Image (tube, rainbow, N blue to C red):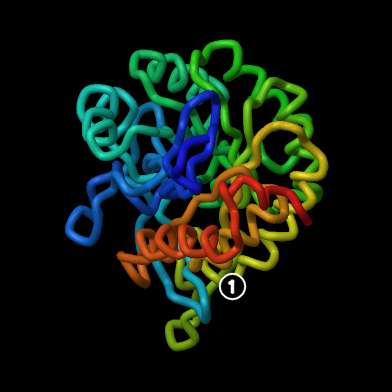
Amino acid sequence: MGANPLEIKLFGKTLKNPIIAASGTFGFGDCFNASFDPHVLGGICSKGLTLYGSSGNGGTRLQETPSGLLNSIGLENPGIESFVAHEYAIMRQCNDFVVVNLGGHCESDYVEGAKLLNEVDIDALELNISCPNVKNGGMAYGISPNDAAYITKAIKKVSRHPLIVKLSPNAPDVSAVAAACQDSGADAVSLVNTYLGMAVDIYKRKPVFERIYAGLSGPAIMPMALRLVHETAKRVSIPVIGLGGISSFEDAVAFMMVGADAVQIGTAIFADPTSIPKIIDNLNNFCASQGLKNISEIKGII
């Protein structure tokens, strides 16, 4: 490692720090240019992409909750062909470590999408088998270890990129799903995606969201996400990327202490668009105050 105490290695690449912008919260890297330079991030994960693109869900899409946010976006995106032709260049200009999040409604969507993404030199492919806001596919593959293993094998056969599998906290045994993905060739896992939640409009006497249930993110889920990362890191030997309610440097440190190699931050930037550079600065200060030559020294100490 170099003099930078936050520098980490992932898939043989050097990241300037372990902070990655989470999928669905940072667009394609340029959404927060007015607030901070995206180059300060260790990496950027794209908005969730699907083979043919999608206009997303109708009706209400966001609802604030105490210490959290419910969302029912529904993977609105321009499609993979558009990404390859246009948005990839934007992401590459914004950061040196580019992750693409791939969603789908069925096996062929995932497979064909992964094949198209072989055309660009992304640094990792994040397989989204945990989105609760689509009718088919998504979380359906992430609940069962057997189903997760099946789709992981299918993508590994066709993709030339390191494969991260993004896991759902709604699975009965998340670490078992992670182990199945590892056994099927996954290069890393990221967890957790959103928890299933619900909101009711008591005056209209109906659910707030058209699809009734939505995904809960934000600080409210952080302790539960932390537990699942801890359990998973004890069960697998591949890198673990932790996410779920991280909004401070203390949260990021906690995730690394329970076994995360890197972390993703998402919802926090909606409340404070400058939260990510603040967290990175505070991580530097933490390393100095604790006498750490590198942040990875704390990885998995709990």
Query: Is 150 situated above or below 100?
Result: above
**Of all residues shown, which one is farthest toward the left?**
34
222 horizontally vs 145: left or right: left
Residue occupying image coordinates x 78% and y 34%: 179
Q: Is residue 222 left or right of residue 288?
A: right
Q: Residue at x 41, y 41 (%)?
A: 43
The x and y percentages for residue 97 are 39, 33
Tag 1 residue: 220
Q: Identify which residue, 281 or 105, lies in the foreground.
A: 281
Task: Name which residue lies at 39% across and 67% down.
Answer: 62
Instruction: Please tell me in which quadrant of the rendered image residue 15 appears.
Output: top left
Q: Position of residue 44 (x, y in %)?
A: 38, 42
Which of these two is toward me, 76 or 11? 11
Q: Is residue 192 above or below residue 188?
A: below
* Picture coordinates of residue 65, whole percent (x, y): 49, 77
| Residue type marked 1 | Ala
Give coordinates of residue 74: x percent, y percent.
42, 49
